[in-house]
Image (tube, coloured by chain):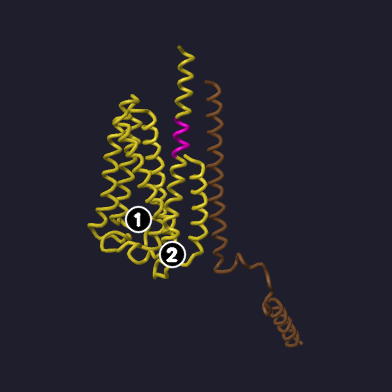
Chain colours: A yellow, B brown
Amino acid sequence: MKNWLKVVAVVLLFYVHIGGMLVDVPRLNILNETIRALYFHVPMWFGMVLLFLLSVYYSIRYLRNPSQRFDHFAVEYANAGLIFGILGMLTGMLWANYAWGSPWHGDPKQNGAAIALLVYLAYFVLRGSVENEEQRGRLSAVYNIFAFAAMVPLIFIIPRLTSSMHPGSGGNPGFNMYDLDSRMRLIFYPAVIGWFLVGVWIVSMRVRVRELEEKIIDIENEKVY
Amino acid sequence: MKKFIKTILGLALLLFSTLAYGQEVEMADGMRSDGKIYVVVAIILIVLTGLVVYLVVLDRKIKKLENLLGEKK
């Protein structure tokens, strides 16, 4: 990852943390000041989807050209995406406790997101259960495509078909209909970009650690022969 | 006598309270204005700064390891 991108991520996040707390927001009943949680809760999910998308991209590249490097990127993007998803779930539960009345409402959006996270957890279970490197890469790449294909309807389509209290689902219009006014957009989109870039940064470091591991194993093997 | 002491005490309390709260004393109240929201901003900035510093240190550590292994090869 380029260094200037890391700087952009940090600058955007500082802007978001200051602006997100201080800039005026729409005055809405029940939500009150918790509307500011939008700047921190929703970017987690946007970041997760973007990271999972990159993970699928590398899985497809791995299937076309089985290089170890693509497998590393696929697994680390999925890993970072899962962390973002868990943080999104926890922040959502805290927010739901005050906006909906209880942390777990059995809302279609919540249930769908939980199932999607479990589907991705199974990806790591699958990886952990296959010893052979090539088999593991191929199987998990195929499963990763399935996981992404399952995640999209679970989070974005099913909650829209039923009644959900979550904004952007069911008969409930999203913030972007009228609540997310231009002032909020000015902070929300930088937040998405900033957190996503931090995710990419973490992925790049974890991939480098994996490559270091490989190099060390290579050196060890050379010693043996 | 009792009544007299009570009156004196009452007057003294009144005097102290007016001294304490009666006048606006200018202080550095910036952080306490607007419902102390600036304290929250400062706190989340500390967390964010800590996280960023941690990431940078980690990045440099990995760089060091890469250089170390690069020399070995």
Which corner quadrant of the image does residue B56 belong to?
top right
Give me the C-alpha separation between circle 2 and circle 1: 30 Å
- Between residues B46 and A189, which one lies in front from this camera angle? A189
Where does label 1 land, which residue?
A104
Q: Amino acid at mark 2?
A: Arg
Q: Residue at x 50, y 62 (%)?
A: A21
Q: Secondary structure at mark 2?
A: helix
Residue A104, above or below A129: below
- The lab-note entry on whether marks 2 and 1 share a chain reads yes
* Left or right side of B52 for A125: left
In front: label 2 or label 1: 2
In the image, residue A211 lies in the stretch drawn in magenta: no
User: Residue A36, how many percent across, how many down?
Assistant: 44, 61
In the rendered image, the residue lying farthest to the top is A225
**Subunit of label 1:** A
Q: Is residue B36 left or right of residue A41?
A: right
Mark 1 secondary-structure assignment? loop
Say whether disc 2 or disc 1 marks the residue closer to the N-terminus.
1
Residue in view at x 47 percent, y 27 percent: A213
Tell me the residue at 70%/76% (across/down): B20
| Residue placed under numbered mark 2 in the picture | A183
Q: Residue furthest right?
A: B1
Q: Position of residue A25 (x, y in %)?
A: 44, 67
Q: Which mark is residue A8?
A: none
**Label 2 is found on which chain of the structure?**
A
For the C terminus of chain A, the image quarter is top left
Q: Are marks 2 and 1 in contact (CB under 8 Å)?
A: no
Question: Mark 1: which amino acid?
Answer: Trp
Quarter of the image holding residue A137?
top left
Q: What x and y, as percent, mark residue A22?
A: 51, 64
The kind of secondary structure the magenta stretch mainly shows is helix
Magenta-drawn segment = A203-210
